[in-house]
């Protein structure tokens, strides 16, 4: 059951609509502390409660000309504060969700960068241990995208020789990087 407006409420609303700052000050001084305490039932931070109540009063003043209150002013203010508390709670939940997602994405990118960096370091070491003819053919094909036929022509060797050298380079890399790849695979699975 809605509480009816008192004569005092009717006069205060009328004065508000006529830009009477004294009526606004009266409402603020009468209800501010109680509204902050009421807000504390929903929000655990005094500063946030004060901000919410102040925002409700700012909106009350801003909307004074078009304001239609069918209940008591106190009921209206309590409902406005309660709704603002729920809005604040939803806002905080959204922020938490986005923070968690951001941190998750940041960790994922950082982990990928570290793994890529480690893999690149190990690959460089492995490539430096491969005999020069194998490494040269492997790098031309895998890093520069040169076709077997073009490599064979440039190095004046057969395509079959290029195939064998790349195969030997891959075999060497698999053996050399096997331990690192096992560790990497284990990290990815965990």
Image (cartoon, helix red, strand yellow):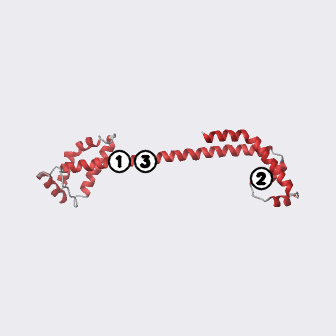
Image marks 2 and 1: residues in contact by CB distance under 8 Å: no
Residue, disc 1: 88
Q: Which mark is residue 20?
A: none
Q: Residue furthest left?
A: 7
Q: In this picture, is 131 found above or below 154?
A: above
Q: Check disc 2 and report the residue beneath it.
A: 139
In the rendered image, which residue does mark 3 sit on? 95
Q: Is residue 1 left or right of residue 168?
A: left
Instruction: Look at 86% across and 55% down and name the residue there.
Output: 160
Instruction: Measure the C-alpha gap from mark 3 to mark 1.
Output: 10 Å
Of callouts 3 and 1, the N-terminal one: 1
Q: Residue at x 83, y 48 (%)?
A: 132
Estimate the x, y position of residue 72 in percent, counting from the top left. 17, 51
Number of other residues with Cα within 10 Å of mark 3, as a class: few under 14, some 14 to 19, many 20 or more? few
Mark 2 or 3 closer to N-term?
3
Whichever of callouts 2 and 1 sits on the residue coming sooner in the sequence is: 1
* Circle 2 crowding by C-alpha within 10 Å: few under 14, some 14–19, many from 20: some
Asked if marks 3 and 1 touch (Cβ < 8 Å), the reply is: no
Look at the numbered disc 3 and give the secondary structure of its residue.
helix
Q: Residue at x 44, y 45 (%)?
A: 96
The front one of 47 and 132 is 132
| Residue 64 pos. (x, y %) | 22, 58
Numbered marks: total: 3
The CA span between labels 2 and 3 is: 47 Å
Q: Quadrant of residue 111?
A: top right
Q: Determine the secondary structure under disc 2.
A: helix
Q: Secondary structure at mark 1?
A: helix
Q: How far apart are labels 2 and 1 at the CA level? A: 58 Å
Residue drawn at (73%, 40%) of the image: 178
């Amino acid at each position: 059951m809605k509480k009816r407006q008192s004569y005092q409420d009717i006069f205060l609303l009328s004065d508000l609509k006529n830009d009477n700052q004294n009526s606004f000050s009266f409402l603020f001084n009468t209800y501010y502390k109680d509204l902050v305490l009421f807000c504390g039932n929903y929000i655990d931070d005094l500063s946030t409660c004060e901000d919410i109540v102040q925002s409700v009063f700012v909106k009350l003043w801003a909307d004074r000309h078009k304001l239609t209150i069918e209940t008591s002013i106190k009921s209206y203010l309590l409902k406005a504060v309660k709704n603002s508390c729920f809005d604040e709670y939803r806002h905080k939940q959204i922020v938490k969700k986005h923070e968690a997602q951001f941190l998750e994405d940041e960790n994922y990118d950082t982990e990928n960068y570290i793994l890529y960096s480690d893999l690149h370091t190990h690959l460089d070491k492995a490539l430096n241990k491969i005999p020069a003819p194998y490494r040269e053919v492997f790098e031309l094909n895998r890093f520069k995208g040169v076709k077997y036929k073009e490599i064979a022509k440039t190095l004046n060797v057969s395509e079959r020789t290029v195939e064998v050298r790349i195969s030997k380079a891959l075999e060497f890399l698999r053996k050399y990087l096997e331990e690192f790849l096992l560790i990497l695979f284990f990290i990815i699975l965990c």
